[in-house]
Image (cartoon, rainbow, N blue to C red):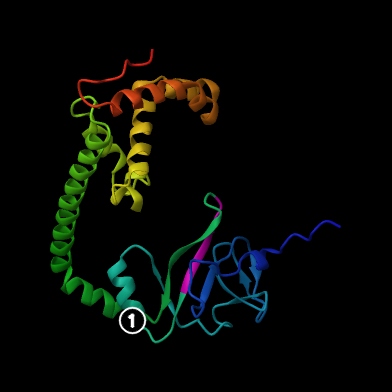
Amino acid sequence: MQPQRKSQTERAQPQSHNKPDEVVVFMARRAGHCAGCGVETGQGGLIRLVDEKAYCLACAGLGDLELLPSGDAAITRRAKKYSKRWAVVVRWSTARKRFERQGLLVEPQAIGQAEDESQNDAEQRRKQRVRGAAARQRDDEEYLRRFAAAIRQQYPSCPPQEEFAIARHACTRNSGRVGRKQAARELESAAIRSAVIAHIRHVHTDYDERIVKLDDRDTARGEISDRVAGILEQWSAPPGERATESS
């Protein structure tokens, strides 16, 4: 017997975007009707699911709340603090295949209070952001220097200054590359090796051209593996004792 497909209501249950005690309201993916009063809930309308039935905000006891769209973290945080009742608003993202937060439903006076407070200390928060950005830049520069030094120590015959190019690429903030992993931040040998191998593939082989031609990353990597291994061996040798570079 084929398993039954889940209904839209069953699929639209709160997931990891919310905490267990949060009230979740959904932006409807298609038009429907409230299970309580029968009013039409159009596409994009706000509904709350109770026992797999969709209710309009009024029937769900949330009709007095106002939507505060996402976008300003300070106002959102403060409005949530000042509102005795609130709910998370989410919408299904077809592209990302997940529910994403769109804002909060909060009491109207909480929005006004949050906006006034945020306006009063806007300049202070701007200065804090500037200081924070400067601190992050200093931290990134220091980490890049340490990462480059670790590359040079592990691969002493790496071409001059190339360790900095490897470090800059691998350690770019928010890139998700190996240099942002905890192992790399602890300068573990395997993480350093992974960053160097990635650099060799893209800079010292025709890996990128093979990817386009073959449309298969694993096959492309297999075809250049000997070349990469040869360069690694060459870079690993002590200065003055460099192995002959593989052709």
Looking at this view, name the residue that lies furthest to the top. Answer: 247
User: Residue at coordinates 38% horizontally, 47% vertically from top-left?
Assistant: 176
| Figure quadrant of the C terminus | top left
Q: Is residue 246 above or below residue 73?
A: above
Q: Which residues are magenta?
A: 88-94
Residue 59 lies, in percent from the top left, at: 59, 83
Residue 177 lies, in percent from the top left, at: 36, 43
Residue 132 lies, in percent from the top left, at: 18, 59
Residue 139 lies, in percent from the top left, at: 18, 52
129 inside magenta stretch = no
Image quadrant where residue 52 sits: bottom right
Kindly tell me whether residue 111 is visible in this rendering: no
Kindly tell me whether residue 210 is visible in this rendering: yes
User: Residue at coordinates 32% horizontally, 83% vertically from top-left?
Assistant: 82
Under mark 1, the amino acid is Lys
Chief SS of the magenta region: strand
User: Residue at coordinates 17% horizontally, 48% vertically from top-left?
Assistant: 142
Q: Residues within 10 Å of mark 1 (few under 14, many from 20)?
A: some
Front residue of this view, candidates 143 and 111: 143
